[in-house]
Image (cartoon, rainbow, N blue to C red):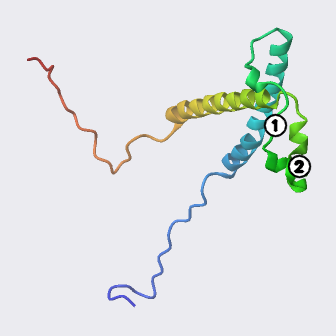
Amino acid sequence: MGKYASSVVKRSKPKYDGPHVIWRGIGCLMMLLIPAISIAAGIETIKYGFDNDWTIPYQLLGYPTLPDLFYQSSGLRMIFGPITRVNHLYAYTAASILYMITIGGTISLLYGVAYRIVGPSRYGPMDEPPPKIKTKKYTR
C-alpha cells in the first residue's frame, strides 16, 4: 500500500479500444482489394502493351528462371514449379507493383486531405496559442 493511496477508491483508466470497427473493416478490405486490382491492371496493361507494340524491356519478358537449388530439390520444385510456367511474370509483377504504389499513394493523399478538412483542431483547449513572431527582412 502506498502512503497516500486509498484501497477504497479504485481509479480506472479510460478504456480505449483503438480505431472504430468500421475503419478496421475498411482497412482489411483495402488490404485485399488494392493488390487484387493492381495485379489485374498490371496484367491487362502488359497485354495492351503487346497488342500496341510498346517497348517493354526484354529482361522482363519470357519465363522466369530459378536458381539450380530449386531444380535439385523436389519439394522446392513442386512449390515454385507453377511460377516458372507463367510467361512474362516479371513484367506482370513490375506493372502490378507500380499500380500498387500509385493506388496506395493516391488513397493516402485523399485520406490526408479529408482528415485535414474534417479532423480535430490542431490545438486543444489546454494548449497555449501559437507564438506571434514578427520577423524583419534580413538585409546586409
Q: Secondary structure at mark 1?
A: loop
Give how far across and how far down residue 42 sits, in percent.
78, 26
Q: Is residue 28 left or right of residue 111?
A: right
Which one is earlier in the sequence, the residue at label 1 or at label 2? 1
Say the numbered circle drawn on residue 77: 2
**Dot 2 surroundings within 10 Å: few (below 14), some, or many (20 or more)?**
some
Q: Nearer the viewer, residue 36 or 115?
A: 36
Q: Nearer the viewer, residue 43 or 83?
A: 83
Q: Nearer the viewer, residue 97 or 116?
A: 97
Q: Nearer the viewer, residue 36 or 63?
A: 63
Residue at 54% over, 30% down: 113
Decide: is 68 above or below 140: below
Q: Secondary structure at mark 2?
A: helix
Say the numbered circle drawn on residue 17: none
Give how far across and how far down residue 81 sits, in percent.
90, 44
Q: Quadrant of the N terminus?
A: bottom left
> Pointer 1: what residue?
65
Q: Is residue 36 left or right of residue 108?
A: right
Q: For the residues marked 1 and 2, what is the alpha-carbon distance in whole angstroms?
A: 12 Å
Give how far across and how far down residue 65 sits, in percent.
81, 37
Q: Is residue 110 left or right of residue 52?
A: left
